[in-house]
Image: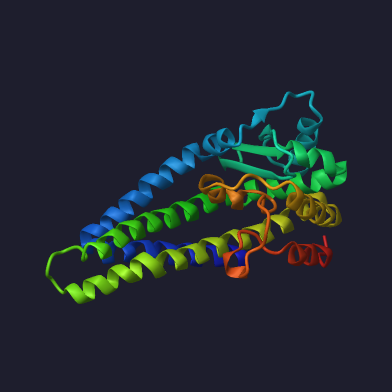
Amino acid sequence: MKNQLKTVLLLGLLTGLLLGAGQLLGGRQGLFIGLAIALVMNFGSYWFSDKIVLAMYKAKPVKKDHKLYSIVKKVAEKAGMPMPKVYIIPTDNPNAFATGRNPKHAAVACTAGILNILDKEELKGVLAHEMGHVKNRDILISTIAATIAGVISYLAFFARWGAIFGGFGGDRNDGGNLISLLVLAIITPIIATIIQLAISRSREFLADETGAKIMNDPKPLASALKKLEQSSKMHPLKQTETSKATAHLFIVNPFKGKNVMNLFMTHPTTEARVKRLNNMEV
């Protein structure tokens, strides 16, 4: 309940930031434009984000006789959830993610790399974590957060151009207008990113907890997380602007290196996650 309430508050703050950015950029008209963009993008993300991200990583559906399919089926049954679609991503980076708009329209994707380094129980723990994301509607929540933050970034981009060319609105209060544009261009997107990433970290902790409860044992997931972090550093995904936008979907950060500040991390530290799991009672 604590994590759920935190998410609601953070999403409300992020939405307020979006509306404020729209107000700064274009007054009431800018506010409504920002809101309209957010609604349109959220609707599109809700219905099509699963297809987009699976295509982005060249995920291939697995057949029913594949060992991964049977493991996912057992975990779904244990969780009391509908069977999701199952995919494999052709990369050595050991990772997994879940996507889809709700439990009846969900997909779980594992990389080829994760199948090579985890034993069966550890893989079940990872898949239970991903089913936890589905159960908690984290796919939808993270998509909305990412979409709103993305719109704020676009508004900030326009604000930077406005500041370069003297601001919008002609001679009306040029000094104040320019300062507002600079705030929007520089500070607002940073705050939006911090809020978005705080939501992402909160949902990772919740999915760890949910996954451990599904399997009635937190130890395999804790063991898997340690293996995944070590191996992911050796086989990172190629980092692009597009792939960075989907980093939060994976069970561990698929890119090499660490952020210098926890505020800018897509995931909680593996150390913190493992500690919480090892201290859990299920």
Residue farthest left in this picture: 171
Q: Position of residue 119 (x, y in %)?
A: 87, 43
Q: Quadrant of the C terminus?
A: bottom right
Name which quarter of the figure residue 28 lies in: bottom left
In this picture, residue 227 sits left or right of residue 60: right
Q: Position of residue 61 (x, y in %)?
A: 67, 27
Colour scheme of the rendered structure = rainbow
Q: Quadrant of the N terminus?
A: bottom right
Q: Position of residue 188 (x, y in %)?
A: 40, 67
Name which quarter of the figure residue 118 lies in: top right
In this picture, residue 164 sits left or right of residue 7: left
Please tell me which residue is depicted at 81% across the width and 49% down the height of the picture: 215
79 and 160: which one is in front? 160
Residue farthest front in this picture: 164
Q: How many marks?
A: 0
Looking at the image, is 67 positioned above or below residue 148?
A: above
Q: Is residue 102 visible?
A: no
Q: Is residue 194 visible?
A: yes
154 and 30: which one is in front? 154
Please tell me which residue is depicted at 61% across the width and 63% down the height of the picture: 265
Looking at the image, is 45 positioned above or below residue 177?
A: above
Please tell me which residue is depicted at 44% across the width and 57% down the height of the picture: 149
In this picture, residue 211 sits left or right of residue 188: right
Q: Position of residue 254 (x, y in %)?
A: 67, 50
Looking at the image, is 60 positioned above or below residue 95?
A: above
1 and 31: which one is in front? 31
